[in-house]
Amino acid sequence: MSSGFVTAVGHDGMHPGAGSLAAIPLVFAGAAVWAYAAAVAASRGRGRPWPVHRLALWVAGVALAVMPTVGPLAVAAYDSFVAHMWAHLLGGMAAPVLLVLAAPVTLALRTMHVTPARRLSRLLGSRPAAVVGHPATAGLLNAGGLWLLYRSPVFEAVHGYPLMHALVHLHLVVVGCLFTAAVIGLDPAPHRPRRLVGAVVLVLTAASHAVLAKHLYAYPPGSLPLAEAQAGAQLMYYVGGWVEASVVLIFCAQWYREAGRRLARAGRSAPIA
């Protein structure tokens, strides 16, 4: 543990999971897992089985999302920039991928009553949802939020106030889910643009993430020790790059399958000579 990080953020003996805030993420995590499992049971009760691996993805995603706010990693992240970066990578990057691949909206539409399901469908098809869920908007929120966090006084405020830490982490998870859903989402998206748009945004966002990591390596935030800042920046660059590479592979696989289905439909509709 580096005392430089503690000094830089004004450590006062507290950590992000201190006090009554520690129980809140656990309550939400338990509710999220229970609701998903109940929906899976309801879907099976109606004779529509739900893949078990998606339930596993949801549970793992919820666990990663809550890990940076409660438990040993949360305590370590308050004192160590390397641990802080692990919290960002697991909670803000890996967790959204797992949560989105669990297709929670599709499951909800399967198990809701007709009226709530129609309302949810109208919300998904609304203009605000189209703007927020567009890859360009989601990518800007994702990349811009990270630059704001690490290149502004927000970084020190996060580690000085437990509530600020929780809110910033919630923002990272939500924005990460929006971005991931915009490029590789399995749930219905009536206004989803062409795959080429998603590909361009995905490349630009990954490039922004890499540039930010290099910038942190050369210019540490606050008064962080250079060695610790560089270790955290390397984690951001390499481990974050692996997470982004997995998203790219999933994106390419989805694009390939869509192209194959289009060719198959074109072949069936072609006139016989």
Image (cartoon, helix red, strand yellow):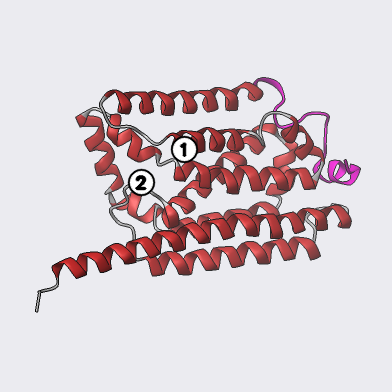
Q: Secondary structure at mark 2?
A: loop
Count all numbered tags in the image, as a single digit: 2
* Residue 24 position within the rendered picture, expressed as x and y whole percent measured from the top left: 58, 24
According to the picture, the residue beneath numbered tag 2 turns out to be 187
- Pointer 2 local density, CA inside 10 Å: few below 14, some 14–19, many at least 20: some
Q: Secondary structure at mark 1?
A: helix
Q: Is residue 9 magenta?
A: yes
| Residue in view at x 56 percent, y 36 percent | 60
User: For the C terminus, which image quadrant?
Assistant: bottom left
Q: Quadrant for residue 51, please give it.
A: top left
Q: Is residue 121 magenta?
A: no
Q: Is residue 127 left or right of residue 33?
A: left
Relative vertical location of residue 215 with respect to residue 150 in this rendering, above or below:
below
- What is the spatial separation of the Cα atoms under label 1 and label 2, in whole angstroms? 16 Å
Relative vertical location of residue 76 with respect to residue 154 in this rendering, above or below:
above
Q: Quadrant for residue 237, please give it.
A: bottom right
In the displayed image of the protein, which residue is found farthest to the front?
273
Q: Is residue 35 left or right of residue 81?
A: left
Which mark is drawn over residue 111? none
| Residue in view at x 39 percent, y 53 percent | 133
According to the picture, the residue beneath numbered tag 1 turns out to be 53
In this picture, which residue range is highlighted in magenta? 1-20
